[in-house]
Amino acid sequence: MPRNRNARVAVLGSSVQRAAASGPSSSTRSSPTRRRLVVVGLVLLSLTLLTVSFRSSALDPAESFGASVLRPFEIAANRVARPFRDAANWTHGIFNAKSENEKLRKRNAALQREVATLEGAKQENLLLQKELHFAQGPRFPKDYDEVGARVLTSPSTLAQSVTISAGSNQGIAKEDVVITNQGLVGTVTKVLGNESQVMLITDQESNVRAVDAKSLPAVGILDHGSGATSLVLDGVGKDKSVAVGDLVITAGSQSGSKLASLYPRGIPVGFISSVSQADTDVYKQIEVQPLVDLSSLESVLVLIPKAGTK
Amino acid sequence: MSSALDVVKAVAFLFIAVLIEVSVIGAYTPLGGTADLVLVVLISIALLRGSVFGAFAGFGAGLLIDTANLTTLGFTSLLLTLAGFWTGRYGETTARDRFHAPFLAVAVITVLYAFGTLALNAVLGEPAPADAYLSGLPATVLLNLVLTWPVYSLMRKVFPPVDVFDRVHDVRLLG
């Protein structure tokens, strides 16, 4: 029987061709030159954008426009995801409800006792301040207006920042302080027309002057901790009294300091979760658990100083 | 050039992936890692449609991410352009007909993307918590690999394989 020579027999030396650039199968095939030109062009374009965007604010209007276009879609995505997020939180809450309830009851009783004590001290403090003509910086929340904004994006491991749905058109400026009704969130780092970028207190670059509310000499700088959601109160001397469970609040500006703190005094930040000290360390090692769940923010308040208070 | 329909489909899928990533997924960090849906979708598309398509898709997706996060424009574009191009080349050459290709591409690109992000941050003088980022990298790779199978299967249906390979297409047989 003669061999079938029509198929699957290739011989070296016979003419071999690449398919011509026509027909449906070649629609996505590209010549090496074109391929290189495209990738080099796109890389150069990216580098140009990167350079211009990094060095100046020339691209801010374009970015602002793009962000405005994306905003309704981001809000829609958040709304779609919300029931799933709520379900996950609810399930998590169910498992922790009993132990948390017990803990909160104890804390509530302790706080009620403390409020009663502090009320008298507050009145006395106000009276003494008046008599001494005590000068101090802007006070929270009295000297601030609040602008509510929706959180549009989630923070990532590398960049602990979020985009919010309010910008210069709503009166927001760079370095405005951002909070929720639970506590401190961060500061505004970039402002566009209707959007702003907020650097969270867990970011590498964030530093907040803070103090143990129960031990006022225990002032330190709140820095990012080992985990993405933990904070460290650094610079508190070993002689200062600090305990687990104490509330940490913003300390405001140091009297006589030329560099004023961005954060007014008295904004709750978190609870001290652990305290330790080693013989070789100069300061105590204090870990703080933020009051606000910064990984799932939905809305925030931006503090805008009232005229003449900044 | 790729068909207009492919472009429309790629834009739609990458747009949705970017929205899900910046609005929803970023908040969840199981085991310290974060699933990168955009990267997995991009890799799937680049494997199925080649290097040029992958580079353009990466550039567009990166630009969207930078715009949504109000970060430096061009940062993510640069990384995703290179990711899309490299994956596309892999798809055009050695990855053809290989079952493990999407998984291998996702694992390798996820690691390279992480190091690329850190390196670019270092070049720009931006702070980058390398310890926290890299300690979550194994979990990120794992999560991306988990996403690869459903995402690649879906993309394969949406972008039916066409001949994007650099191979000999016509052989004259001896009579």
Image (cartoon, coloured by chain):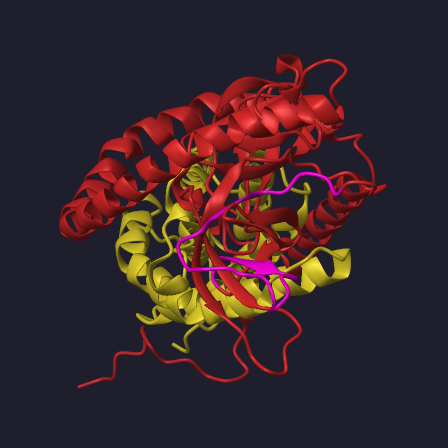
Q: Position of residue B47 (x, y in %)?
A: 43, 58
Q: Position of residue A301 (x, y in %)?
A: 51, 25
Placement of B125 over or under A9, stated as above or below: above
Please give the name of the residue rendered at 54% of the width and 73% of the height, measured from the top-left corner: A15
Q: Quadrant of the C terminus of chain A?
A: top right
**Viewer-closest of A75 and A117:** A117
The chain letter corresponding to yellow is B
Q: Position of residue B57 (x, y in %)?
A: 53, 45
**Viewer-closest of A232 and A279:** A279
Q: Is residue B160 left or right of residue A247?
A: left
**Viewer-closest of A99 and A33:** A99
Please give the name of the residue rendered at 25% of the width and 44% of the height, measured from the top-left corner: A104
The colour one sees for chain A in the rendered image is red
**Viewer-closest of B30 and A218:** A218
Q: Which secondary structure dominates the residues rendered in magenta?
A: loop
Q: Is residue B17 left or right of residue A47?
A: left
Q: Quadrant of the N terminus of chain A?
A: bottom left
Q: Position of residue A293 (x, y in %)?
A: 40, 43
Placement of A111 over or under A159, stated as above or below: above
When asked about the image quadrant of residue A3, the answer is bottom left
Is A229 in the magenta?
yes
Q: Is residue A65 visible?
A: no
Q: Is residue A162 visible?
A: yes
Residues rendered magenta in the picture:
A227-254
Is A88 in the magenta?
no
